[in-house]
Image (spheres, rainbow, N blue to C red):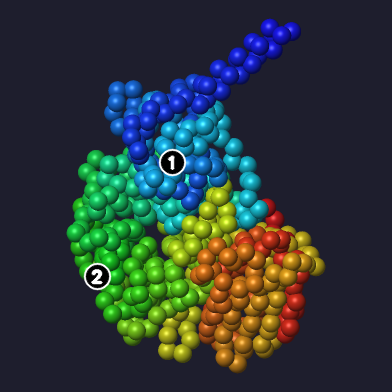
Amino acid sequence: MKKTIWMFMAMMMALTTEAQQPPMVLGDNHAMLKLQQEKRYILLPVQEKEDIAAIAVLDGHNNMVQRLNVKLAIDRVDYYVPYEIKGACLFDITFHGDRRQKGAVGEFACWREIKYSDTFGTANRERFRPVYHHTPLYGWMNDPNGMFYRDGVWHLYYQYNPYGSQWENMHWGHSTSKDLIHWESQPIALEPDWLGSIFSGSCVTNGNETIAFYTTAGLHQTQSMAISRDNGKTFTKYAGNPVITSDKPDFRDPNVFWHEGTKRWIMILAAGQEMQIYSSANLTEWKYESSFGKEYGNHSGVWECPDLFSIEDKWILICNINPGGPFGGSATQYFVGSFDGHKFTCESMPKVTKWIDYGKDHYATVSFYNAPENRRVVLAWMSNWQYANQVPTQQFRSANSIPRDLGLFRYGEETYVSVVPSKEMLDARGEKVKQPTEACEIVVDVKGSADITLSNTKGEQVTMHYDAGKQTIAMDRTMSGNVSFSEAFPCVTEAPTYGQIKQLRIFIDRCSIEAFDAEGKMVMTNLVFPSEPYNSIKVKGGKVTIYEIKY
């Protein structure tokens, strides 16, 4: 019996030793780690408050095959991220930060806590993970990228960090859906290369090919392309990359579409505080056409993530800006005008600024290429750069907004973009319920001014006030729950309603509230982090109907 116990203990010690292979410490901030080859993944322990550790990945011939930045754990583990080994043999690791405050490299917690496994669990362990909004299985997500529709499937790519839940290591993640609500995670579509990280961009379909245009962000930002012949599942990068270069420091986010009038492909991209327009007959050779932006709209921050498309007889230029939003941080402005295939002309006076969403958490709005029924369907990143890295989740960070359809309406002398929940959200309506749930749609029919209060038993609440006389609506989240992670988070947001509101549609999903005028003249998106779901609603000046969201 004793011999059996001793043999069992010896076996466990051997397994533990194998799983905790010591690093080769080479200096105060430098170490190497030989990777075991028996398992599919090495699970890297992350500690979010720490500085970046730069990892050069080497194969069996000492060729560097990848670079990644990971906040390796120094004294405790917040969570793990997987790295698929696939023949990688050595990590060459450089730790940044002041080592005198961290202790000896060889004593860092990461060496004790590194694990090897054939699997990586992605089951939800976050109480704030949305029920019916798109999120990554794990890791960080920001801008939606390359969205297109083909053969009944909506494709969503997105800025993605698979090696941590804060911004870094930009890839293109990929998800697909048949109804814009239920999303299936797909393998990573684009990985960084020696031109740089993979920043935002777009996709077009041309015959049997799907062509992705994206920014490669290295020492400078350049525009590159990749081609897929399996409907966007895998891409081969174009041998002639980069296809467009510039000496501007902020030069990114190419958005491409076909212009029927000139029979040419058009690219619009962000360059500092203007948008540049290019044209091409073959998608590889691009001619500069014009620029737009000088003196128009808001210029408090860098212009990013453009989109250019027609609705009815107007052309809409989407311009995301950070900072400069109406309530601080990032937001989406737009311009209405005309486009002749060469130049965009805004019909408003230069100082007129129009916002597509008056909440705090709606950015990087772009549309799907080739949406059916001539629809203009958009998604946005549901966060704000002021605090996106600090929101109280760790398995993942950030979600996309619900899908929205754009249109036009007139008010006074101006033409505005209308925003309504996509029709798929009506299909998601479930049974009527008496009180709010963590995932529901609240419909409020109003006559005149109205006050709406959502609350829970902890005393946390969100209030909305519609002033029919002033034609404004405000949302107050200062007492919504956890607001302590950023001074910029507690706030009151206010929007013009451009006339009277008759009905509000309010979508709640664990950590978000999206409020729409049913006619599309106002929308406001705000994150919330209550300690328990809002389960009570009080309305003064309106009639309430509540629907569960089917999922």
Q: Is residue 427 above or below residue 187?
A: below
How many neighbours does mark 1 have within 10 angstroms: few (below 14), some (14-19), or many (20 or more)? few
User: Which label number is shown at residue 220?
Assistant: none
Give me the residue at 72% from left, 66% from top: 534
Q: Is residue 521 above or below residue 160?
A: below
Is 503 located above or below residue 55 in the figure? below
Q: Nearer the viewer, mark 1 or mark 2?
A: 1
Please report contact status of discs 1 and 2: CB closer than 8 Å, yes or no: no
The 10 Å Cα crowd at callout 2, few under 14, some 14 to 19, many 20 or more, is: some
Taking the spot 31% from the left edge, 79% from the top edge, the residue there is 296
- Residue visible at 52% across and 62% down? 382
User: Which comes sooner in the sequence, label 1 or label 2?
Assistant: 1
Give the amino acid type for the residue marked by disc 2 in the picture.
Answer: Ser
Residue 246: tell me if it is visible: yes
Front residue of 183 and 453: 453
Helix, strand or loop under label 2: strand
Residue 204 shown left or right of residue 181 in the figure: left
Q: Is residue 426 visible?
A: no
Q: Which residue is mark 1?
A: 103
| Residue 72 in the image, given as x and y percentages of width and height | 46, 41
Relative image position of residue 85 (x, y in whole percent): 44, 29
Q: Which residue is mark 2?
A: 291
What's the amino acid at mark 1?
Gly
Disc 1/disc 2 C-alpha distance (Å): 53 Å
Q: Is residue 264 left or right of residue 24?
A: left
